[in-house]
């Protein structure tokens, strides 16, 4: 079922040439969140994570979603834990989990099921792992509800962050 498309959109691995556009987009979304009193990603506005974002792009772990050759969303998937993942989840040497970071959609495509479509695409196309894991700020109720509504299980809290995981194999069993 591998596909590089969500209906009307193309998904591809970001290249180094996309780095500046992705970082600019993430900062614009972080500013949008701040302006809308959503307490998530404020550190991006100060240049926090720029180097990590560039490294994830260089490692071919970052994806972009394109509409008419314009980047409208991005996300990063790590098959090995980052330092942040170890802090939030503890050491995981099983390599059974995929860690989702910086799922970001430009505001004009928010509330149009783009996030749900991306999560479905990940589950359908990257099913070698057992779990898809992520974290988000615990008091960001909209984002927490978004993940719960997309079948992610809240498995705990660490350092003010909600920890969510989705059993990818269980997800596929529901279609058999």
Image: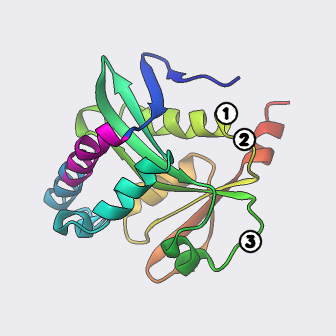
Q: Which residue is mark 2?
A: 127
The structure residue drawn at horizontal position 54% and vertical position 24%, both measured from the top left corner, is 4
The percent coordinates of residue 97 (x first, y second) are: 69, 58
The front one of 175 and 64 is 64
Q: Is residue 112 left or right of residue 81?
A: left
Q: Alpha-carbon neighbours of circle 3 within 10 Å: few (<14), some, or many (≥20)?
A: few
Quadrant for residue 155, please give it.
Answer: bottom right
Q: Is residue 28 left or right of residue 74?
A: left
The outermost residue toward the left is 35
Q: Is residue 2 left or right of residue 58?
A: right
Q: Is residue 112 placed above or below 161 in the rendered structure?
A: above
The outermost residue toward the bottom is 159
The percent coordinates of residue 78 (x first, y second) are: 57, 56
Q: Which residues are magenta?
A: 16-27
* Numbered circle sitting on residue 10: none
Q: Which residue is mark 3?
A: 93
Residue mark closest to the camera, 1 vs 3: 3
């Amino acid at each position: 079922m591998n596909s590089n498309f969500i209906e009307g959109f193309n998904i591809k691995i970001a290249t180094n040439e996309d780095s500046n556009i992705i970082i600019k987009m993430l900062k614009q979304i972080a500013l949008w969140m701040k302006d809308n009193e959503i307490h998530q990603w404020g550190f991006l506005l100060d240049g926090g994570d720029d180097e990590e974002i560039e490294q994830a792009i260089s490692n071919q772990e970052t994806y972009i979603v394109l509409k008419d050759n314009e980047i409208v969303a991005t996300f990063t998937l790590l098959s090995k834990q980052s330092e942040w993942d170890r802090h939030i989840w503890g050491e995981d040497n099983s390599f059974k989990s995929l860690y989702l970071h910086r799922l970001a959609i430009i505001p004009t495509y928010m509330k149009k099921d783009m996030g749900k479509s991306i999560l479905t695409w990940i589950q359908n196309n990257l099913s070698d792992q057992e779990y898809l894991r992520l974290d988000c700020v615990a008091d960001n109720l909209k984002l927490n509800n978004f993940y719960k509504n997309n079948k992610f299980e809240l498995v705990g809290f660490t350092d003010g962050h909600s920890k969510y995981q989705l059993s990818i194999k269980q997800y596929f069993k529901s279609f058999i």
